[in-house]
Image (cartoon, coloured by chain):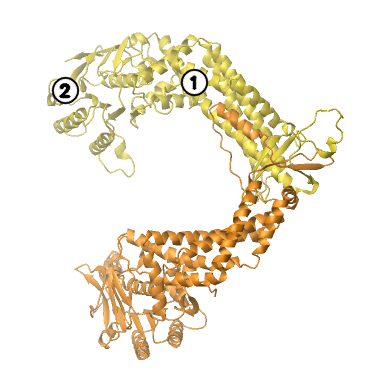
Chain colours: A yellow, B orange
């Protein structure tokens, strides 16, 4: 089992999902791009953010690792450097392997001895490099004081794999592969199958065979210790034996295959961690940026039904405006299934909805948010439904805007299970408002009855009256101050 | 022909060469099964059909079926062993392979013997086998093989070691019974300690050459001398005599598989009754070759040819299923004649001597026009066929004007009737309805002339409903008039 710095259980950590268009609608990529990460890091960061964690303990797991890295700020960089080398070893090896395997067989399909030798030497060298780099990672981690479950697990795993009793004989074996030649004292061990064919052919240490050739026996000293009798023996003149070369080539290939398999297994087990470091590198950049902006930073309390926050900033606005020019928002604790926000055009309804969406996504990734306090439920699915006017001009799309909205809404309803969140922005305003309100209220109630939450910004002023007490929390924007007040 | 045969095959053909492609049999069946369908059995046709039907019938019994599978597998194994023997040029390996071939032969003989008494054809095979390889000989072979196994196992359980060529005087040494761990085993053990389970790649066995083979032979000289003695004891035994049964068994398995698939689709399958009178009666017969075209629904039809109506004409709408009906009749008739089950609910069929087909062919530009070519082919069929043949004529003589074609059709019909043969003649010459021959017609229904693909004994309408197809492609009179106006 491989150690993961992102998932407490690398194979079974449950993950939620985010609707296809949601990252774009919440401008997530724009926010990430503002952090000035490399493209690879930005892609990986976005991929991780859009696979939300759904269990509080999984979120804690990431937060602790992030804290360890914050306490040991040099550690990520040092680990990055070693993992970089490990990646390079793998890439070089993949190229070499491809190159050498291409010439491994002759046009008649037989293994070419010289090519097999090269393959064996390369396999030995790569395994050796891999082991040495793992040892370097182990040393680097051991030099820090760590408390997080994830990094301690990595340390334990490395201790077990590159322990002295494993590493020393393995490195010795790698050196023999690396320096292998016809004169390096390796014999061939053969086994026959039931048809008299040679079914197994392996390289063996010649020195360990208790055998002396008859001619050599004669030169023994008179009082030398008596040797055990040889097993049945036959002398062969191998000079004209082509098969011996084939057997040796097959044996070299077999050993190279095993070494490559072990190397690949070690790469698989540890290289994931190298990739995951990228997430923490990005997270640290994000946190540092928030601090630079002077925003309060907190980890949201997660896990119950209540949504609440104090002085929540929209991170996108933080990218473009000074903090003093932005009005943060509060939400008093609410556990109503629906949250309806009404208000004038340009009063910040969409920004409000976006800041809630981003808060939810960052919190479910185990990351801090720009707020003094926050409390959020954990959702299994996060969808958005934003009104759109462009699709009607797409080629081949004959549906009107309202039909498109309805179609998209049907998709959301098809996909959503329970414990989901739907963020709706001015939905169903492309038809008669009264009909839009009525139609939408049925859908929103359907969502809530299925155990989901929804948050809507709207101009459908009739809509709130379609709900009973306790079904929704109704908010109104204050155009002057962008402050929302509960109605 | 081998004396050992499950099918009693002769060289007498049961169909003309064109029938295979006309009836799509070459796409439905493998080459070896087609070979069986092509020729008749020895002796009474009815008796051979019943004997083969007996085997098909018993294949529904799991015990009998498993016996057949065991026989087939044993024979295939024997064939493989004999092939290996033929390929081997190394004395040491040859001994191994010959012993394995004897073992495979004995397994096959015993498998066949276990089926003795289960069906007439298997009894015949066993009777021949009792002469070729009597029980006393089988016991002797079995005892010798047991001893051979002991000898061979000694070598299989040994590990041989081939040392380097540098040891002494350019000589290598082959040793037996060496337990030195190979580098691969050391690597695997170390990987296991790291929690990585390596799987050695299985490689193609390498056959020994003369030099290494001789060395093995020297190491186990005594054993190989004894094995050679055993081999020489049965040198006169013809191990290849059984191999002819493989294709014959394949025929049974392939036809059974075909029937099984049809039954799984809910299509009826039956073993027809062998009629003493010249008759072809079948209920719900269908054309299985439609499956090759992924036809969503196969419509069955009834067939009834008897002494008073031996030659029948089939007329009707284009695309109404006439050729399909003819093909259904032909395929099922040939299957019956080969002793197979057929694709129908029930049937009673006379063991006709042969099936002849006459389908339209493309212009060959061989110096002979299409009509002349058709006439020549008809003449040849009528020359070759005996009175027990069944003729399937598809739009014969359509390569000329209606009057001439009709006249030729009537002449041919008269010749067929005079010879006492049976046949089906598909045609668009509607005048055949008034010539005293039984007429079948493709049924269409409703205003839209819906094709039912049902064939009934009735005179039919005075149309081939070609207008429907012309209208579909806007080439009917009304569509052409519309085009004229638009031009």
Relative to B255, say whether A458 is above or below. Answer: above
Q: Quadrant of the C terminus of chain A?
A: top left
Give coordinates of residue B278: x percent, y percent: 33, 83
Identity of the residue drawn at 60% across and 18% down? A136
Label 2: element kind? loop
A235 left or right, relative to B461: right
A369 left or right, relative to B219: left
Considering depth in this image, is A367 or B256 the residue closer to the camera? B256
Give coordinates of residue B331: x percent, y percent: 38, 72
Q: Chain of mark 1?
A: A
**Can residue A106 be seen in this snapshot?**
yes
Mark 1 is surrounded, within 10 Å at the Cα level, by few (under 14), some (14 to 19) or many (20 or more) other residues, namely many
Give coordinates of residue B162: x percent, y percent: 73, 41
Residue B263 quadrant = bottom left
Q: Which residue has dot 1 on it?
A: A277
Q: Which residue has dot 2 on it?
A: A471
């Amino acid at each position: 089992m491989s150690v993961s710095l992102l998932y407490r259980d690398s194979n079974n950590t449950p993950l939620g999902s985010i609707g296809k268009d949601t990252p774009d609608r919440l401008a997530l990529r724009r926010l990430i791009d503002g952090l000035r990460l490399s493209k690879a890091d930005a892609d990986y960061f976005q991929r991780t953010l859009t696979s939300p964690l759904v269990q509080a303990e999984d979120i804690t797991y990431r937060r602790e690792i992030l804290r360890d890295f914050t306490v040991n700020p040099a550690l990520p960089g040092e680990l990055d450097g070693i993992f970089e080398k490990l990646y390079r070893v793998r890439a070089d090896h993949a190229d070499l392997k491809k190159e050498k395997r291409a010439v491994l067989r002759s046009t008649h399909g037989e293994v070419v001895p010289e090519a097999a030798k090269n393959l064996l030497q390369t396999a030995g060298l790569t395994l050796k490099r891999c082991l040495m780099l793992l040892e370097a990672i182990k040393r680097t981690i051991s030099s820090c004081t760590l408390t997080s479950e994830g990094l301690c697990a990595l340390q334990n795993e490395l201790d077990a794999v590159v322990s002295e009793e494993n590493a020393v004989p393995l490195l010795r074996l790698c050196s023999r592969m690396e320096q292998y030649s016809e004169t390096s004292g390796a014999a061939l061990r053969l086994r026959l199958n039931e048809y008299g064919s040679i079914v197994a052919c392996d390289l063996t240490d010649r020195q360990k065979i208790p055998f002396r050739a008859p001619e050599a026996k004669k030169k023994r000293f008179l009082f030398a210790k008596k040797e055990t009798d040889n097993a049945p023996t036959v002398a062969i003149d191998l000079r004209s034996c082509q098969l011996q070369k084939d057997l040796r080539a097959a044996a070299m290939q077999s050993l190279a295959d095993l070494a490559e398999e072990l190397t690949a297994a070690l790469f698989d087990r540890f290289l994931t961690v190298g990739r995951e470091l990228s997430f923490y590198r990005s997270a640290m950049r994000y946190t540092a940026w928030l601090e630079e902006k002077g925003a309060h930073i907190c980890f949201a309390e997660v896990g119950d039904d209540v949504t609440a926050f104090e002085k929540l900033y929209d991170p996108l606005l933080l990218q473009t405006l000074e903090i003093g020019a932005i009005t943060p928002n509060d939400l008093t604790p609410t556990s109503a299934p629906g949250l309806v926000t009404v208000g004038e055009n340009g009063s910040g309804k969409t920004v409000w909805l976006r800041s809630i969406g981003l808060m939810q996504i960052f919190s479910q990734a185990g990351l801090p948010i720009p707020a003094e306090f926050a409390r959020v439920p954990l959702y299994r699915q996060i969808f958005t439904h934003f009104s759109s006017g462009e699709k009607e001009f797409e080629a081949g799309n004959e549906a009107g805007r309202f039909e498109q909205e309805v179609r998209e809404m049907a998709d959301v309803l098809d996909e959503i299970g329970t414990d989901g969140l739907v963020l709706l922005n001015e939905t169903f305003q492309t038809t008669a408002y009264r009909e839009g309100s009525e139609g939408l209220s049925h859908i929103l109630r359907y969502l809530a009855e299925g155990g989901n939450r929804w948050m809507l910004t709207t101009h459908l002023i009739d809509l709130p009256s379609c709900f009973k007490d306790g079904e929704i929390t109704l908010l109104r924007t204050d155009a002057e101050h962008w402050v929302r007040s509960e109605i | 022909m081998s004396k050992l045969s499950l099918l009693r095959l002769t060289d007498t053909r049961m169909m003309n060469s064109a029938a295979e492609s006309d009836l799509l049999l070459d796409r439905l069946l493998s080459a070896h099964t087609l070979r069986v369908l092509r020729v008749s059995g020895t002796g009474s046709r009815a008796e051979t059909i019943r004997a083969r039907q007996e085997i098909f019938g018993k294949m529904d019994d799991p015990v009998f079926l498993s016996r057949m599978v065991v026989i087939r597998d044993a024979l295939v194994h024997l064939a493989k062993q004999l092939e290996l023997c033929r390929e081997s040029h190394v004395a040491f390996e040859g001994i191994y392979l010959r012993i394995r071939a004897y073992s495979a032969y004995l397994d096959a003989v015993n498998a066949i013997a276990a089926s003795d008494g289960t069906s007439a054809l298997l009894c015949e095979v066993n009777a021949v086998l009792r002469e070729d390889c009597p029980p006393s000989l089988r016991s002797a072979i079995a005892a010798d093989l047991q001893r051979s196994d002991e000898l061979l196992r000694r070598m299989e359980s040994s590990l041989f070691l081939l040392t380097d060529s540098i040891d002494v005087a350019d000589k290598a040494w082959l040793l037996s019974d060496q337990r030195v761990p190979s580098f691969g085993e050391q690597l695997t053990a170390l990987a296991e300690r790291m929690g990585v389970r390596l799987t050695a790649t299985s490689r193609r066995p390498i056959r020994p050459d003369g030099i290494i083979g001789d060395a093995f032979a020297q190491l186990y000289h005594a054993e190989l001398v004894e094995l050679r003695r055993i081999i020489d004891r049965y040198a006169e035994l013809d191990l290849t005599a059984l191999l002819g049964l493989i294709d014959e068994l394949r025929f049974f398995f392939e036809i059974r598989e075909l029937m099984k698939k049809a039954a799984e689709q809910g299509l009826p399958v039956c073993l027809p009754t062998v009629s003493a009178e010249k008759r072809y009666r079948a209920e719900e017969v269908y054309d299985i070759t439609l499956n090759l075209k992924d036809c969503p629904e196969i419509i069955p039809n009834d067939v009834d040819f008897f002494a008073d109506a031996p030659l029948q004409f089939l007329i009707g709408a284009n695309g109404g299923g006439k050729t399909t009906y003819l093909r259904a009749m032909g395929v099922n008739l040939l299957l019956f004649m080969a002793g197979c089950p057929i694709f129908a609910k029930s049937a009673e069929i006379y063991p006709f001597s042969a099936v002849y087909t006459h389908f339209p062919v493309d212009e060959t530009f061989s110096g002979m026009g299409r009509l002349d070519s058709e006439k020549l082919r008809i003449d040849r069929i009528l020359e070759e066929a005996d009175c027990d043949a069944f003729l399937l004529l598809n739009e014969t003589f359509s390569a000329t004007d209606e009057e001439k074609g009709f006249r030729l059709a009537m002449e041919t019909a008269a010749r067929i009737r005079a010879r006492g043969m049976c046949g089906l003649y598909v045609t668009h010459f509607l005048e055949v309805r008034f010539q005293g021959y039984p007429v079948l017609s493709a049924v269409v229904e409703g205003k839209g002339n819906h094709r039912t693909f049902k064939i009934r004994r009735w005179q039919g309408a005075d149309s081939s409903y070609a207008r429907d197809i012309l209208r579909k492609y806007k080439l009917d009179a009304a569509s052409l008039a519309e085009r004229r106006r638009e031009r």
